[in-house]
Image (spheres, rainbow, N blue to C red):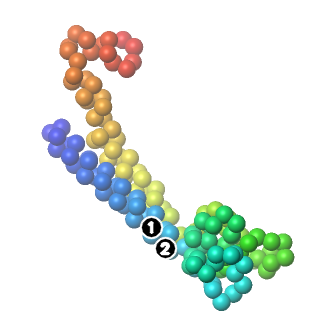
Amino acid sequence: PRRRLLLSTLFGTIIGLVLLGAAYYSISKTTSSVDHLSNNTCATSSGIYNCDQCVAVDACSFCAPNSTAEGRCMLPAATDNCTSPGYYYVDDVCYSPYSFTIIVAMVFYIAMFASGIGTLAWTINSEIYLCGCEATHSPSPP
C-alpha cells in the first residue's frame, strides 16, 4: 500500500506541475492586448502584443481604460493621455480571467506532494536505524 500511495502521489505531483505551467501560460496569453494603431511610446512596443509582455519591460507600463480593455504600451509621463480620467497604468500585474487557476493548481500540487513525496524523508529516516537507536537519531529531542 505504501508503494502504491507513493507512485500515485508522484504522478499527482507531476500533474500538478503541468497544471501550474499551463495556468501560467494561459494567463500570459489571455491578458489585455496592445492596440498597435494608437500612440505606443515604449521603444520596444512593436514586438509587444499583450499587457503581460508590456509590463515585463522595465521602463514600460500598460495604459487602459479598464482591466479587460485593449490598451497602449507606454513610457509613463505626466503629459500623456493616460492621465485623463478613466485611464490608468498597470505596472506589474495584468488582469486575466484565469488567475484563479494558479491557486487551484498550487493547492493540488502541495496536497499531492505533502501526502506522498513530502513524507519520504521521515519514512526513510525511521527505517534505516535500529530499534534501540531511533530516539537518539531523530530530529527532535527525546
**Badge 1 vs badge 2, beta-carbon distance below 8 Å:** yes
Classify mark 1: helix, strand or loop.
helix
Q: Is residue 24 left or right of residue 136?
A: right
Q: In this view, does 83 lie above or below 102?
A: below
Quadrant placement of the N terminus: top left
Residue 81 rendering spot, x and y as whole percentages? 79, 80
Q: Which of 46 and 96 is in front in this view?
A: 46
Residue 70 appears in the picture as rendered? no
For residue 41, which numbered disc appears in the image? none
Residue most extreme to the front: 43
At horizontal 49% and vertical 68% (from top left) the residue drawn is 27
At horizontal 21% and vertical 24% (from top left) the residue drawn is 127
Residue 17 rendering spot, x and y as whole percentages? 36, 55
Residue linked to disc 1: 25
> For mark 1, does the 10 Å Cα neighbourhood hold few (<14), some (14 to 19), or many (20 or more) residues?
few
Q: Is residue 141 above or below residue 13?
A: above
> For mark 2, does the 10 Å Cα neighbourhood hold few (<14), some (14 to 19), or many (20 or more) residues?
some
Q: In this view, does 93 lie to the left or right of 79?
A: left
Residue 22: which quarter of the image? bottom left
Residue linked to disc 2: 29
Q: Which of 70 and 38 is in front in this view?
A: 38
